[in-house]
Image (spheres, grey):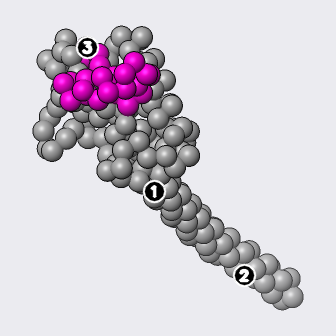
Amino acid sequence: MNKGESRPNYFVFEGDNKEILWFIPLSSRIEKVLRIIRETQGRPCDIAHICDVGHRKQVFVIQDMFPATKDYIQQEYTVNRNPYRLVNQKDIQIVENKASRIKSLIDRGIKIMPTLPNVNQIENQLLEKLNNDKINEQKLTNEDSSKENIDNDKENTGRNEIRRREFLRRQMNRER
């Protein structure tokens, strides 16, 4: 979703870390991208891919891809209750291959466009957040486990006290 509207915007694929998703913006501004592609003068152009999505020509702006986690997905976009998806396997493969090449450049610190945000920094922040979330979850699990152990210890102490008293009672009865 974008700008609070209910319209599709992204092709999503998993990164190397399965908890990080990479989003490729979807745009209808095909003319702008065609101008850029023409400037490449026949050289391969991995920054975008034009194809039919939902019976319309659209462009995936691969150069603008960015990382996020599933927490940032509100819902799947649908048209007449049908998911709005890229279904042509050839186009899916092309987008994924181009994205892989662009992601490789990004991983090496090469910025495709000078105005793009530092997506490596964003990815590292997301990984740090995921790691902190796991640590906090582990702490909560350990706290729950500690509370359970304390409860068990109290229960065992109570049982042991009952046994001790019973033993003492029997000893006293024998002495009489």
Q: Can you tell which mark lies on residue 165? A: 2
Q: Are marks 1 and 2 in contact (CB under 8 Å)?
A: no
Q: Mark 1 points at which residue?
A: 121
**Mark 2 nearby-residue class (10 Å; few <14, some 14–19, many ≥20):** few
Question: What is the distance, in whole Å, between disc 2 and disc 3 at their CAs?
Answer: 82 Å
Q: Start and end of the magenta stretch?
A: 30-53
Q: Are marks 2 and 3 in contact (CB under 8 Å)?
A: no
Q: Position of residue 85 (x, y in %)?
A: 29, 20
Q: Residue at x 54, y 38 (%)?
A: 104
Q: Is residue 173 visible?
A: no
Compared with 156, 112 (above or below) is above
Q: Where is residue 101 in the image (x, y as percent from the top left)?
A: 51, 31
Q: Please report whichever mark, 2 or 3, sits nearer to the chain's N-terminal start.
A: 3
Q: Which residue lies furthest to the right in this view?
A: 175
Q: Which amino acid does label 3 sit on?
A: Asp
Left/right of residue 108 with respect to residue 71 in the rendered view: right
Secondary structure, mark 3, is strand
**Mark 1 nearby-residue class (10 Å; few <14, some 14–19, many ≥20):** few
Secondary structure, mark 1, is helix
In this view, the residue in front, 111 or 28, is 111
Q: Which amino acid does label 2 sit on?
A: Arg
